[in-house]
Image (cartoon, rainbow, N blue to C red):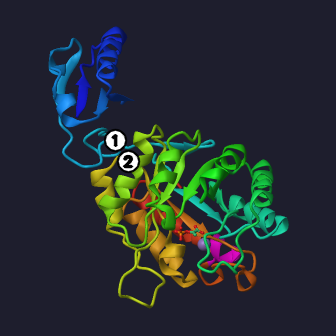
Amino acid sequence: MIIILKPSATEEQRQHIIEKIESLGLRPNVSVGVKRTVIGVIGPEDVVRSVPLEAFAGVEKVVPILQPFKLVGREFKEEDSVVQVGDVRIGGRKFVVGAGPCAVENREMLLETASFVASCGAAVLRGGAFKPRSSPYSFQGLGEEALKYLAEAREKTGLPIVTELMDPRDIPLIEKYADMAQIGMRNMSNFALLRELGGLSKPVLLKRGNMATIKEFLMSAEYIATNGNFNVVLCERGIRTFETTTRNTQDLSAVPVIKQLSHLPVIVDPSHATGRRDLIEPLSKAAAAVGADGLLVEVHPSPETAMSDGPQSLTMPQFAQLMKNLAPVARAVGREF
Ligand code: PEP
Ligand code: MN
């Protein structure tokens, strides 16, 4: 349930409520909004209901949360959340584009791509150091070496970096080098890993599993939030359907549906959704139009030689064109671009 405090509630009253909750072995989650402060109480329903929290000074009302996702749902927090990645804010007015290669293949290609996407207006640099490949014989990523190149690219361009984390043993490396941890679609349901992310000091980009319902997607975000990390950005990256002309099917209706259900920012990855570079621009425009907070797009200096995801990677001139053509669409729906 959530406890909504009166606007006039004092710090002392708030502290008293929190202490009461903790004394029952329950976990309070305080969310200070523009309009009101709410305290989420997570724990067994009978224990939660055993205290007449309505009677405490400073409490306006106590509301049960009906949705299964408690902390990431709109019932808990009405206003949109903004997640800070380095100096970039995702979920505010600005439409944020994250771009870069699927994998960091070497220093030169990364630095070249990073400077180019930055010059076109990308706000975040992506690049895989640990690659989740279907074959154990395919390129697996350069690991820490790639993270060092990413950190160098951030130095040079000022762009914060997002990179995939697959193994909880690599968390110290993510803490050391990255600005945001990407959880790929294959790990969306790796609950042990999600739990570990609760303690991460960096925000998380959570990708939707290709077989996950919206509810399952939000429950995965809930795992991260309930373990202590509210800085989660959701990414719709395509789901598996019967359609074979695209790699996956971009579920664009998920964007406004998630916006109704959750306060978390939502971005769209048209690269993995379609697997086709010719579809990136139309889907990017559509993503902006349906209310996404940004994009994640793969860009490669020479896609034909890419070690992974070449067919869906934009060339650098194509990325420049995308940014130019996307700007009026994003602005038309009230976003800064
Ligand atoms: C990626 O971003 O390169 C990636 C592997 O994405 P996904 O987990 O969505 O397949
Ligand atoms: Mn990829």
- Residue 314 is a magenta residue: yes
In this rendered view, identify the residue nearer to me: 288 or 168: 168
> In this view of the protein, which residue sits in the foreground, 76 or 136?
136
Q: Does residue 17 belong to the magenta stretch?
A: no
- Tell me the residue that label 2 is attached to: 222
Q: Is residue 256 visible?
A: no
The residue sitting at 60% across, 49% down in the picture is 180
* Some atom of ligand 1 lies within 8 Å of the CB belonging to the residue at label 1: no
The correct choice, above or below, for 263 with respect to 293 in the image is above
Which structural element holds mark 1?
loop
Q: Are marks 1 and 2 in contact (CB under 8 Å)?
A: yes
Within the displayed image, which quadrant is ligand 1 positioned in? bottom right
Q: Which mark is residue 174?
A: none
Percent position of residue 313, x then y: 63, 77
| Residue 188 appears in the figure | yes
Q: Which residues are magenta?
A: 313-320
- For disc 1, the marked residue is 71
Image coordinates of residue 256 in percent, x first then y, are: 31, 60
**Labels 1 and 2: the sequence-earlier one:** 1
Question: In front: 86, or 19?
Answer: 19
Dot 2, how many residues are within 10 Å of its Cα: few (below 14), some (14-19), or many (20+)?
Answer: many
